[in-house]
Image (cartoon, rainbow, N blue to C red):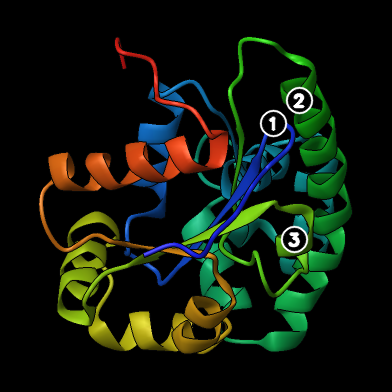
Amino acid sequence: MCRSLRCEHKPIIGLAGGIGAGKSVVAGILAKLGAGVIDSDAIGRRLMSEPTVVEVLRSWWGDSIVDAEGGIDRRRIGDIVFADSAQRARLEHLLHPRIVRERELLIERFLADPVVRAVVLDSPLLFETGLDRRCDVVWFVEAERETRTRRVATARSWTPEELRRREKLQKPLDFKRARADCTIVNNSSVDDLRSQVVRLLSLALQETPRAEV
């Protein structure tokens, strides 16, 4: 379902949903449909590999957060920050301004690029950071808990307890669903998911998607 929306310019679409709901899959479909996708997690991962950031993190948490190749051990970082809210806030304070600057540069670049049909913000903290206010429309990607639990167990080796622990650090799903303009249900096939995305993108663009996509 989707509330009425009309974008008079190239739309900025925000993606929200529970962990394991399939936001990245939706973002991938949108990229194939001609959207410019900005993945905040990917930006954060890239920033954590920058030498200046690595040195700051080592000064905080020691050499245990560096892997054998000299890069950041993100699993170890995750263990630290998800067990201690003060350490998580410390990391966010370091990375967030950098992520914002890079994201804004990408938004402006995509908006100016005539080939890009829409801009997509894929951020796990879309509402928590107020990034939803940057969007013309927000899509909520929904999947049953059993489905999400199975997905994160396969993709990330998380237990159900780990999923619950991480979700407690985000806004409740009911809050995200209520604040979103559209809901995409991702409990079925990729083809079904793609059909929903094509339809909603068409609404956002107020035109029929290109025949070749």
Q: Residue at x 20, y 62 (%)?
A: 151
- For label 2, the SS is helix
| Residues at circles 1 and 2 in contact by the CB criterion of under 8 Å | yes
Q: Residue at x 44, y 35 (%)?
A: 202
Q: CA distance from mark 1 to mark 2?
A: 7 Å
Q: CA distance from mark 1 to mark 3?
A: 17 Å
Q: Residues within 10 Å of mark 2 (few under 14, many from 20)?
A: some
Would you identify the image quadrant in which residue 161 lies? bottom left
Q: Amino acid at mark 1?
A: Lys
- For label 1, the SS is loop
Return the mark for residue 111: 2
Q: Classify residue 105 as left or right of residue 157.
A: right
* Disc 3: which residue: 131
Query: Looking at the image, is mark 3 or mark 2 nearer the viewer?
Result: 2
Return the mark for residue 10: 1
Q: Between residues 49 and 144, which one lies in front from this camera angle?
A: 144
Q: Earlier in the sequence, mark 1 or mark 2?
A: 1
